[in-house]
């Protein structure tokens, strides 16, 4: 993979910015192209400067092009860095998740934390109560969350709409707050969703359901 190639592929965000800079785009144009803010572009530039030990954008792009022309092992260097960074993030996530789970376990509202591949990572007692799971929360860890979601959908007035909306939320990767959904018994729940991210990649899904008093 070329360091500043503009061709599509598994480019990191930093390399995407380098490729667009090599094409002569401004920060505002890059932000529009990548769908992020100009402030985020600026933060990436700071990291890129440190990576290339450079003082200006022109110098950064020139060095990147030089490395590409010389065929240096930038791909291998980046791969090793990404592996080390992912391991560090995973350790931090594991530590923070354990503390978070302790807090969420006692909430009166339902909490479900899924892994990226839709396996149950955590759910609390209120989740089991609200969605009528007779099993203990810890016994649901590792279960197929997609299957559980399909079972839960039967308890809502719009079963198909419930499932479709779940897929839409996950596909969008955007946080959701305060969505109201009606159950077959006439009661209502309020749903929140937060994508859990690391290095700009979604690594989990956090769902929160609150009972709305009648």
Image: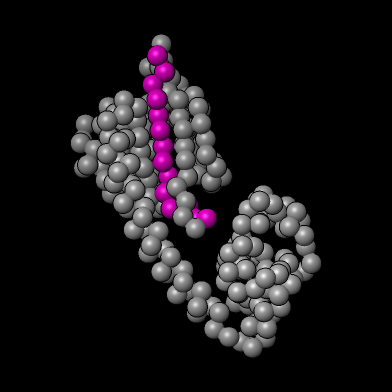
Quarter of the image with the N terminus in it: bottom right
On the picture, is 129 further left or further right than 76? left
Q: Taking the image as drawn, is residue 91 in sight?
A: yes
**Which residue is situated farthest in the top direction here?**
214
**Which residue is situated farthest in the bottom direction here?**
70
Q: Position of residue 150 (x, y in %)?
A: 39, 37
**Which residue is situated farthest in the right direction here?**
24
Query: What residue range appears in magenta?
Result: 200-213
Q: Position of residue 209 (x, y in %)?
A: 40, 29
| Residue 64, above or below 128 | below
Q: Nearer the viewer, residue 135 or 3?
A: 3
| Residue 130, above or below 97 | above
| 63 drawn magenta | no
Q: Residue at x 67, y 70 (%)?
A: 55
Magenta span: helix, strand or loop, mainly?
strand
On the picture, is 151 further left or further right than 81? left
Q: Residue at x 67, y 64 (%)?
A: 17
Corner quadrant of residue 74: bottom right
Q: Nearer the viewer, residue 203 or 148?
A: 203
Q: Taking the image as drawn, is residue 128 in sight?
A: no
| Residue 48, above or below 198 | below
């Amino acid at each position: 993979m070329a360091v500043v190639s503009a061709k599509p592929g598994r480019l990191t965000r930093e390399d995407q910015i380098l490729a667009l800079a090599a094409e002569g785009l401004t920060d505002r144009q890059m932000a529009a192209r990548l769908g992020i803010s100009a402030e985020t572009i600026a933060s990436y530039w700071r990291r890129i400067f440190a990576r290339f030990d450079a003082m200006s954008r022109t110098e950064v792009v020139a060095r990147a092009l030089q490395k590409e022309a010389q065929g240096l092992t930038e791909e291998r260097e980046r791969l090793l860095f990404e592996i080390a960074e992912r391991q560090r993030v995973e350790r931090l996530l594991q530590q923070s998740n354990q503390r978070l789970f302790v807090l969420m376990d006692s909430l009166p509202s339902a909490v479900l934390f899924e892994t990226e591949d839709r396996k149950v990572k955590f759910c609390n007692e209120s989740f089991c109560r609200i969605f009528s799971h007779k099993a203990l929360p810890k016994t649901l860890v590792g279960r197929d969350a997609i299957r559980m979601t399909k079972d839960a959908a039967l308890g809502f007035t719009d079963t198909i709409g419930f499932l479709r909306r779940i897929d839409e939320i996950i596909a969008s990767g955007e946080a959701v707050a305060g969505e109201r959904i009606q159950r077959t018994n006439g009661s209502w729940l309020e749903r929140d969703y937060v994508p859990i991210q690391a290095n700009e990649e979604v690594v989990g899904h956090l769902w929160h359901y609150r009972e709305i008093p009648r």
